[in-house]
Image (cartoon, helix red, strand yellow):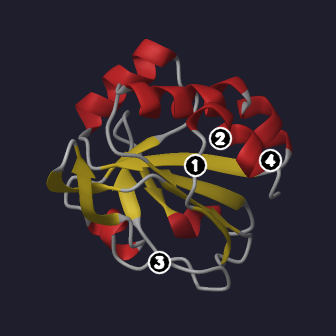
């Protein structure tokens, strides 16, 4: 994994398309708190638990002023199926060119069953109203992820 960004760092700007073809840019959310969560793959067990934790606590997150974005290197169609299957209420951004995962330092070497490969590390950045990284969650608990975010805002 590249070096993660640290609290106090200006969050890298990005623009990306979500599951419905809508474009989102970080600059559109100035004045709001943003939870930018990076996850490996749509519709896999851990990623599903994480997304459902956020879904089930979405109204509470919104009430605290937090805009949620999921980011993976899956494409728009994959995101659309994932959103529909689990009724996810927040945008999933398609980063097929790996620009956002690279800018945020979450793309890197991983290993499963002794086999090494490149992939997205499960990391969440909380970005404050000024566009500064306020917190980094690099030990994500997929079942309790919404609680981890709520504990920091």
User: Of the residues under marks 1 and 3, which one precedes in the sequence?
Assistant: 3
Q: Which residue is denoted by mark 4 in the rendering?
A: 150
Locate residue 62: give its quadrant. Answer: top right
Q: Nearer the viewer, residue 62 or 47?
A: 47
Dot 4 or dot 3, earlier in sequence:
3
Q: Secondary structure at mark 3?
A: loop
Q: Observer-nearest residue: 6 or 91? A: 6
Q: SS of the residue at dot 2?
A: helix
Quarter of the figure with residue 103: bottom left
For marks 1 and 4, give the one nearer the viewer.
Answer: 1
Label number found at residue 145: 2
Residue under the point 66% across and 49% down: 67
Contact flag, marks 2 and 1 (Cβ < 8 Å) = yes
Task: Indicate the position of residue 104 as horizontal and vertical percent values.
Answer: 42, 71
Give the secondary structure at mark 1: loop
Judging by the rendered image, the residue that carries numbered circle 1 is: 140
| CA gap, disc 1 and disc 3 | 21 Å
* CA separation in Å, label 2 and label 3: 23 Å
Identify the element where label 4 is drawn. helix
Residues tagged 1 and 3 counted as in contact (Cβ below 8 A): no
Contact, CB < 8 Å: mark 1 with mark 4? no
Residues at marks 2 and 3 touching, judged by CB atoms closer than 8 Å: no
Above or below, 92 against 3 in this view is: above
First in sequence, mark 2 or 1: give its number.
Answer: 1
For the residues labelled 2 and 1, the Cα–Cα distance comes to 6 Å
Residue 124 vertical position relative to residue 68 in the rendered view, above or below: below
- CA separation in Å, label 4 and label 3: 23 Å
Furthest-bottom residue in this view:
9
Return the residue at label 3: 12
C-alpha gap between disc 1 and disc 4: 13 Å
């Amino acid at each position: 994994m590249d070096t993660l960004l640290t609290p106090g760092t200006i969050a890298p700007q990005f623009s990306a398309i979500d599951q419905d073809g809508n474009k989102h840019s970080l600059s559109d959310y100035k004045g709001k708190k943003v939870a930018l969560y990076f996850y490996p793959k749509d519709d896999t067990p851990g990623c599903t638990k994480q997304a459902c934790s956020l879904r089930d606590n979405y109204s509470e997150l919104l009430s605290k002023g937090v805009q949620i974005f999921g980011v993976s290197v899956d494409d728009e169609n994959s995101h659309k199926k994932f959103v529909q299957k689990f009724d996810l209420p927040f945008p999933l951004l398609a980063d097929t060119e790996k620009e956002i995962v690279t800018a945020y330092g979450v793309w890197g070497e991983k290993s499963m069953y002794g086999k090494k490969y490149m992939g997205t590390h499960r990391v969440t950045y909380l970005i404050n109203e000024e566009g500064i990284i306020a917190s980094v969650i690099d030990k994500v608990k997929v079942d309790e992820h919404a609680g981890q975010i709520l504990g920091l805002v």
